[in-house]
Amino acid sequence: MTTDDDLSDERPDHDDEEVAAEVAAEVADDTDALLQLVSDYYRGAVNQANNSQNRIDQTTNWAITLIAALLSVVLSSPDVPAYLLLVGVVVLCVFLTFEVRRYRFFDLYRSRVRFVEENVYANALDPSGVEHARWREDLGSDLRNPTFKVTTREAFTRRVRRIYGLLFAVVGVAWVAKATLFTPETEWVESIGVPGVSGVVVAAVFAAFYVAVAAVALWPSEREAKGEIHESEPGKWKSE
């Protein structure tokens, strides 16, 4: 038989929420406690940003390693077909997809670090340069509802400009060299052909891909990522 005490144990207890709200309110009103909390949070945010940066670096290292290995195989012998370099392009696209998403997470964590630096540490050193009057509310809102601060397109653009544009260029130059310099006895149209697909079609698709990547990477757009060391106007803090 179920007793009233058993039923009361099954009811949701709102006391914990009230206690948590009271504790948070006390910290918010206590300057020393708040600064200690912000300092601890800042160290954690820096660690998150560093871990995200390390994940990006690992992806880049893998991409460079695999492309270097593929080039050494393809250029080692005239008998190795040139279309194997197309595998390198596909591999780079896969790694670029990974990096775009990882970069968006990195920018999210980095923007929070810079936000604390701008509104806590910078103001402590120079109180006249206030950046955000409601920085506590803005940061709290972003912690409750995390949002990316940079679009997929901008993340793609930045990774292509910084790293992958050069890697794509290396593969493209190697592909042209393989079709001309490394197989002089074969017509270049035949050397770049894929089984079942003529070399002209392969060359057209290859060229169109490079033009599309260059167009997206170089197309002018307003910067949204949070950061100042990029020779451009930084994006604004976004809380929605």
Image (spheres, helix red, strand yellow):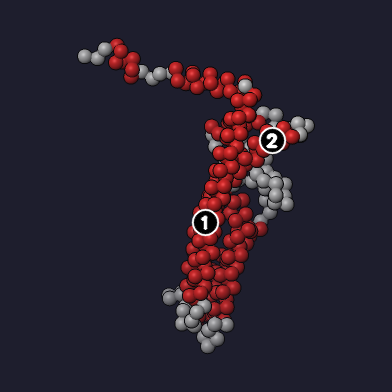
Front position in the image: 169 or 41: 41
The percent position of residue 67, horizontal first and vertical second, equals 52, 67
Q: Residue at x 52, y 85 (%)?
A: 186
Q: Residue at x 67, y 38 (%)?
A: 117
In the picture shown, does residue 221 fall above or below 190?
above
Front position in the image: 46 or 146: 46
The local secondary structure at tag 2 comes to helix
Q: Residue at x 49, y 18 (%)?
A: 18
Sequence-wise, which precedes: disc 1 or disc 2?
1
Quadrant including the C terminus: top right
- The residues tagged by marks 1 and 2 sit, at their Cα atoms, a distance apart of 31 Å
In the picture shown, does residue 146 fall above or below 2?
below
In the picture as drawn, the residue positioned furthest to the bottom comes out as 185
Assess whether mark 2 and mark 1 are in contact (beta carbons under 8 angstroms): no
Q: Local crowd at mark 1 within 10 Å, few (<14), some, or many (≥20)? A: few
Which residue position holds label 2?
121
- Say what amino acid the circle numbered 1 marks: Gln
On the question of residue 64 being in view, the answer is yes
User: Horizontally, is 73 left or right of 214 in the view?
Assistant: left
The percent position of residue 97, horizontal first and vertical second, equals 52, 55
Q: How many marks?
A: 2
In the picture shown, does residue 43 fall above or below 76?
above
Which residue position holds label 1?
58
Q: Nearer the viewer, mark 1 or mark 2?
A: 2
The percent position of residue 7, horizontal first and vertical second, equals 31, 15
Front position in the image: 187 or 146: 146
The percent position of residue 197, horizontal first and vertical second, equals 46, 74
Quadrant including the N terminus: top left
Q: Residue at x 52, y 62 (%)?
A: 63
Quadrant hosting residue 57:
bottom right
In the picture shown, does residue 169 fall above or below 22?
below
- Say what amino acid the circle numbered 2 marks: Tyr
